[in-house]
Image (cartoon, grey):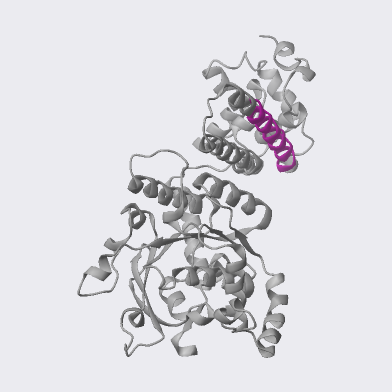
Amino acid sequence: MSHTMMTDTAEHAQPPHDREAEQAVLGAAMLSKTALGELATELLPADVYRPAHQAIYRACLDLFADGTPVDPITVGSELERRGELDRIGGAPYLHTCTAAVPTASNATYYAEKVATKARVRRTGELGTFLVQAAENGNYATPSDADALLSSAQHALDQAHGSQTSSETADFDAMTHDVLDYIDNMQTGAAELNITPTGLADLDELTGGLRPGQLVTIAARPGVGKSVLGVQFLRHAALHHGQAGVMFSLEMGRNEIMSRAISAEARVRLHDMRRTGGMSDEDWVRVNKRMADLQGAPLLVDDSPSLTINEIKAKARKLARDRDLRLVVVDYLQLMTSGTRVESRQQEVAEFSRQLKLLAKELDVPVIAISQLNRGPEQRTDKRPQLGDLRESGAIEQDSDIVLLLDRPDAREQDSPRLGEMDLILAKHRDGPMGTVAIAHQLHYSRVADLAQD
């Protein structure tokens, strides 16, 4: 094939691309080892539109990975060995590319232009696919449409984000990253990515909530698991400026915000709910704290009958728009897939797996609130155990942290531990297990360290 046939096709009939920028990228790659090293981390061969340019870029990357010098001569020899030299326009075309770039130091600038065109192309391809899927698919139920929307959102997120990150890495490539990670942990630099719970003893044991973790908070009804979930969210948003969202399938947004105000203002939740229950001093405290609450990045979604696909789609959007740092789902057993399933246990297992994948995808901690079965009530030892997780052992398997809540005074009115709650760290994938005793102040819809109260 002639050089003219390979490179001079009608531009207007082709998807978006930048021929000159692609030539400049290839020229820089063959002129400078430093430039090629930068390009290797910024641009994938699939981002390059023209097949001839893709072939040249792959040859450059392969030679670079083998430690072979990269220049027009070595690249030409490699392409000839592969039987691709004539297809790209011959050896003269390689020199055309090197002549197209004034200096190799501008390689990343041209790479950005090429990557931008690639994202535009992928977005257009996604649009075509969605039109065809919508017209030809058999969508009989709302859940079918939700699944299509979730898939489309995920594909759009991928097109919108970086297209150049590798999903695999060998040990040598990971060595520097893991040493930096350990160093950041030791110096405290990694704390910027950690979400504190606001409970000192719990944070000491867990190191705080970390990106990618699935944290399950489980208890019997009325013990305080939703209070704890709201407190983690409230503490992150109000005291650390970290945006968090609560997907609530049990409480409405007014109830959630009432709990947050009660906890922050130290006004009894019961008094806030009954006519004339609040004193003038209560109103002063509420109004004083409202200013802080209004500016906090605390988000609530109480949409009825939320499906797992809807939660994932909304969380992805918030991650793009609001720098999301924490997700709370209250609670697991109220979620629905919208489709028929063989068993409720399998359905809950799928919810657990999807939430763990979401935590990893968004690189934020996801808190799943869960019910316990009646196991503790039927044993002599009433303290909850991992086996008491309701409807699915997969919750234990998928979770990085499992917190089981136990209130001795909930089952014994004359308990000597009145006002105390145990946070039983029953599973901790990255650290020690143990029990943290805290003070519960459920009348204020909050908990606190025992040492502080």
Q: Which residues are magenta?
A: 108-128
Which x, y percent locates residue 188? 53, 72
Which secondary structure is most common in the magenta stretch? helix
Callout count:
0
Q: Quadrant of residue 439?
A: bottom left
Tell which of 66 and 137 is nearer to you: 137
Q: In the image as oriented, which residue stretches furthest toward the front? A: 275
Considering only vertical position in the picture, is 90 above or below 441?
above
Closer to us: 357 or 223: 223
For image coordinates 49% across by 66% down, the residue present is: 209
Which of the pair 78/352 is nearer the observer? 352
Q: Relative to 343, is 331 on the left or the right?
A: right
Is residue 423 visible to us here? yes
Residue found farthest to the left: 380
Q: For residue 333: magenta? A: no
Q: Residue furthest top?
A: 1
Residue 368's spot in the image, x, y percent? Answer: 45, 59
Q: Quadrant of the N terminus?
A: top right
> Which residue is nearer to you in this view: 163 or 317?
317
Q: Residue at x 67, y 57 (%)?
A: 322
Q: Identify the residue shown where x is 39% and y is 60%.
A: 400
Residue 243 in view here = no
Q: Position of residue 381 (x, y in %)?
A: 22, 75
Using residue 353 as the reference point, say whether residue 91 is left or right of it: right
Residue 93 in the figure: left or right of residue 339: right
Q: Position of residue 414 (x, y in %)?
A: 32, 89
Does the magenta-highlighted stretch encompass residue 123? yes
